[in-house]
Structures are given as structure tokens and as C-alpha cells.
Image: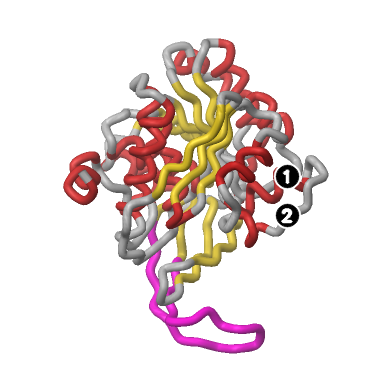
Amino acid sequence: MIVVGSYNQDLVWRTPQFPKAGETRTGQFSQGPGGKGFNQAMAAQRLGSRPLFIAALGRDALGDAARKLAELENLRCAWQLFEDTATGNAAIWLDASGQNQILVDLAANRQLTAEHIASHADAFSSAKVVLAQYEANPAASLQALILGRKYGALCLVNPAPASADASALLAMADIITPNESEFASLLEQTGESIHSGAIAAMGCAELHALARRLPCATVIITLGQRGIVLSTDDGFEEITAPAAIVRDTTGAGDCFNGALAAELATGRPLADACGFAVKAASCKVERAGAALAMPTRADITARFG
């Protein structure tokens, strides 16, 4: 499988309660590797999938650290390096419940070129799944999906963060995996105005009917601790998440997407792959961190069976 996406250095502040406007609070600081693409590639790697991760970095200390880490983790990478652009980074706030607020400077991720993707066409010729998100340059992600379709790979798009400028990517997707806010954003583009906060409370049939309005045959709506709703042309299914002690939700959606792609790459049926990915994400939220907190297959089995 191939993951095309972002690498960001995560700068994390933990505080009991998010500060209000104009308020100063104390907290604890830490940092580590992240970015939706890198998190997803690491999730797949920890599950034994051996993905190829294609992304961009700045020629700076953060970029050097990213390359060294990938080598230590035996993650195959095809980096595009830029002299005059910084490596991506993200400011992450975590409160006592493990919920997060994130601000990202995508930096080098937005410079990833379609030409760099095309230079690795041989890798796409043998890929079973191509996974992309919205954090990299859309032209590069589109090139990856075009190559995926050319060689018969399953094209999986995680429409995150929400964007109104990614219709071309959606048109190339076999499967999309929005969360509540991303689903609301996608629906808004069809003329349907629904507040993201209302989506988690909707019934499966209602969510399925809304998903059928989107230009993709398979829509997987991720609903946090509730689980997911899988919507296809043939019907819908809800897969509930096992009970978990939430410590850190950062990267949970990425864990789901990486695990889903890894399972689909083995030929596992879609519903079964979704069920496993839900368990993987539930395992992840019990761990602090992002990329380095992705669980192994043994971790998931030990925790949830």
C-alpha cells in the first residue's frame, strides 16, 4: 500500500481545561512526530503492512529528525526535500478528558509535487491500496489517486482537514472516511446544511441517506467513541466501538484510516476491515501521543480480542 500525505512535528500542550479568549493557563509541553499521512503510515507499519510513505520535508532539524525516525521504524519513505520551506508542524492542546484542539502549519507538505509522485509510478503498479488526505498539496494527492486507479488500486481518501477545494480528490475516491465535522462540510457542498454537533446523535438510517448524497460509492462516517457508520449503495451498517479509557484522541482517526487501509490491502472484506480498524482506534486513544502511539496487531488483540 501507499500513503501520500503530510509529516508534521507535533508540539503538544496538556492542560486540565482549554483557555478561554484572553485567559492564560499553565500546562505541560512535549513534542513528537505526527501529521495525518505519517500517522496513517505508522499505523499501517505497526500492523505489518510495509507501506510506502510519500511526503515532503524542509531541509531543517525537524526534517532531519523525521528521516532518522522513519529509518529507526523501518518505514519506507520517498521524501521530497525543500531548501526554502520549513518542515510542517502542529500545535496541539489536550484537556483532561483527552480531547484536542489543533493548529497546523503545513509548510513543506503543501509543496509536495505531482512530479515527485509520478517519479514513483513503479511503486503504484504493485500497490493494492492508495491512501491520501487533505494535508498535502492537492495536485500531488490527485496524481497519486490517478496512478492508483491506473494500476487498479483501491483509492481511499480521508477528507481531513475539511476543505471546500478537494472535489477532484473526492471524484477519484472509492472510499471516503469523514468524521462528523468533515461529513458536515461535505454535505454543505451539496446544499445540505447540518451542524456537525448534530451528526453524532443521528440514527444510522438518517446518516446513510445523507451519505448517499455524496459523490462516492462508499462512505465511512467516523463517530468517535460511538464507532462508525458504513454506508454503501447496498445499504448501511453501524459498527460500535469497544469501551475504552480515553487518554488522548490525537491521531485516533489516523489510526483508523491506516488500519483500514492495511486490512483492505490484504483483501479482507470491507465490513471486517472496518471492525478491526475501530478496535485499533479504540486502542490508540488509551495511549498518549500520535505516530509513536500506534498499536501493533498484538496490542489490539490483547486489549479487545
Question: What is the x, y in percent for residue 180?
Answer: 59, 52
Question: What is the x, y in percent for residue 40?
Answer: 43, 41
The reply to whether residue 65 is in sight is no
Viewer-nearest residue: 236 or 61: 236
Secondary structure of the residue carrying numbered label 2: loop
Kind of residue sitting beneath label 2: Ile
Q: Quadrant of residue 243?
A: bottom left
Residue named by callout 1 = 187
Horizontally, residue 209 falls left or right of residue 36, namely right
Residue 155's place in the image compared with 256, above or below, is above
Q: Is 146 contained in the magenta span?
A: no
- Precedes in sequence: disc 2 or disc 1: 1
Viewer-nearest residue: 238 or 260: 238
Whether residues under marks 2 and 1 lie with C-beta atoms below 8 angstroms apart, the answer is yes
Q: What separation in Å lies between label 2 and label 1 (alpha carbons)?
A: 8 Å
Residues drawn in magenta: 12-32
Residue at screen point 34% across, 22% down: 266
Secondary structure of the residue carrying numbered label 1: helix
Work out which quarter of the rendered image holds the N terminus and state it: top left
Question: What is the x, y in percent for residue 115?
Answer: 62, 23
Horizontally, residue 252 falls left or right of residue 22, namely left
Residue at screen point 62% across, 26% down: 217
Residue at screen point 43% across, 53% down: 251
Work out which quarter of the rendered image holds the C terminus and state it: top left
Residue named by callout 2 = 194
Horizontally, residue 173 falls left or right of residue 185, namely left
Residue 103's place in the image compared with 118, above or below, is below
Q: Is 20 contained in the magenta span?
A: yes
